[in-house]
Image (tube, rainbow, N blue to C red):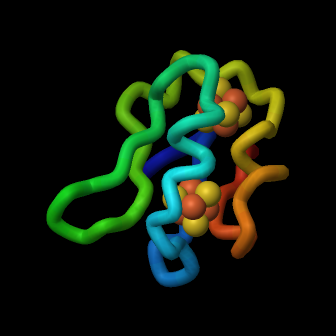
Amino acid sequence: MNNIVLINEGLCIGCAKCVELCPKKILYIDVKTGKCKVSDESKCDRLRGCERICPVDAIKII
Ligand code: SF4
Ligand code: SF4
């Protein structure tokens, strides 16, 4: 369970916009599911760029 980067896989369309944007390179698209995942959320800068760029509101920083 993630405590910082919450990804709603039901909403995610795998567009990778957040992956390209993330300055910490901690977001990736899981090859099996085609959905966004986070690798090491402890590196997150919490500046919410991913939240703003996601077209379907699938990612939240808490
Ligand atoms: S808030 Fe920033 S560092 Fe954290 S996952 Fe989103 S884009 Fe990456
Ligand atoms: S921007 Fe949103 S829809 Fe696109 S891969 Fe990231 S979480 Fe999924």
Q: Where is residue 50 in the image (x, y as percent from the top left)?
A: 70, 44
Image point 27% across, 55% down: which residue? 30
Residue 47 sits in quarter: top right
If the picture is divided into quarters, which one holds ligand 1? top right
Seen in the picture, residue 35 relative to 51 is either above or below; the reply is below
Taking the spot 80% from the left edge, 38% from the top edge, the residue there is 48
Residue ranking furthest to the bottom: 10
20 sits to left or right of 26: right
**Residue 58 visible in rendering:** yes
Q: In which quarter of the image is the C terminus?
A: top right
Image location of residue 40, percent across then percent down: 41, 26
**Between 16 and 49, which is closer to the camera in this rendering?**
16
Q: Horizontal placement of 22 versus 14: left or right?
A: right
Residue plotted at (60% across, 50% down) = 17
Residue 26 lies, with reference to residue 23, above or below; the image says below
The number of callouts visible is 0
Residue at left offset 36%, top offset 33%: 39
> Does residue 7 appear anywhere in the picture?
no
Give residue 45's position: percent from left, percent from top.
71, 20
